[in-house]
Amino acid sequence: MSTTYALELKDLRKSFGKTEIIRGANLAVQSGERVAIIGPNGAGKSTLFNLISGRFAPTSGEVLLNGQRIDGKKPFEINRMGLSRSFQITNIFPKLSVFENLRCGVLWSLGYKYTFLKFLANLDDANERAEELLHMIRLDKKRDVLGMNLTYAEQRALEIGVTIAGGANVILLDEPTAGMSKSETARFIELIREVTVGKTLLTVEHDMGVVFGLADKIAVVVYGEVIAFDTPDAVRANARVQEAYLGSVLADQQAAQAH
């Protein structure tokens, strides 16, 4: 009997013209796992995310979400099947309040679809769910503040809230802590842990402290291939990973800390 994974990539390939960016990537993520995707710049990590979330169609290969093929589907179709992602650049509604951003995120999953004529204040279930999310991302005190007036870290927290608002089982976060201070990063890791309990998480991240502090498993992407996929300790000890990427990164970070 074959295993049904939350997310599975099978010999996934993507070329732009004659340049092959993703070169037969394979990955099988169990339901509930937290996976960090790491690799050098230009390795294909963002392209991989774009293929999974439907922004790009693969040249060949398959992407399966809970056993169903999603490669070639449009992003909104994939989202409705249970996968949601955030982006490197914060993607919220800047002229809506924090609460309104969250309420927009829950409407479709509650079955309201395009019912624009409904008066939103009367949608008790949507308002209740938005309030729950507001508390979950710890922005209760900023409920009525416009998205554009939040701090950078608060905007990222709001984007996480919008990302999970639709009830997706598989969450993709693209460099969620980029641009944050150490204290903001530490708080954000805890937030990510809390809001993704019971969900499958994939995150692209360059900060090794975040990677080793958050991930159950690490996928190492080099030249468009997944060269290792294992627990943090196993990846850290992997000779091929050390040679291709991790050794130099850890050495650079240790040198920076020494100074």
Image (cartoon, grey):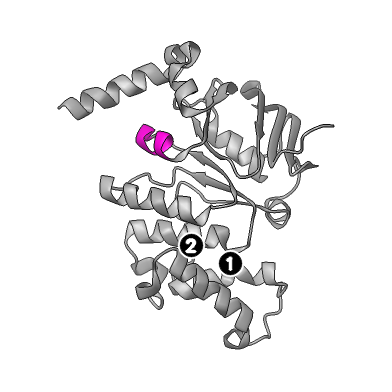
Binning the other alpha carbons within 10 Å of mark 2 as few (below 14), some (14 to 19) or many (20 upward) gives: many
Marks 1 and 2 in Cβ contact (< 8 Å): no
Pointer 2 residue: 92
Residue 55 visible in rendering = no
Q: Residue at x 72, y 50 (%)?
A: 74
**Helix, strand or loop for disc 2:** loop
Kind of residue at disc 1: Gly
Q: Which residues are magenta?
A: 207-213
**Helix, strand or loop for disc 1:** helix
**For residue 135, above or below residue 68:** below
Q: Looking at the rendering, in which quadrant would you find the C terminus?
A: top left
Q: Residue at x 25, y 24 (%)?
A: 254
Disc ID at residue 105: 1
Of 57 and 205, nearer the camera is 205
Kind of residue at disc 2: Ile
Q: List the single residue furthest toward the right.
A: 1
Of 78 and 82, nearer the camera is 82
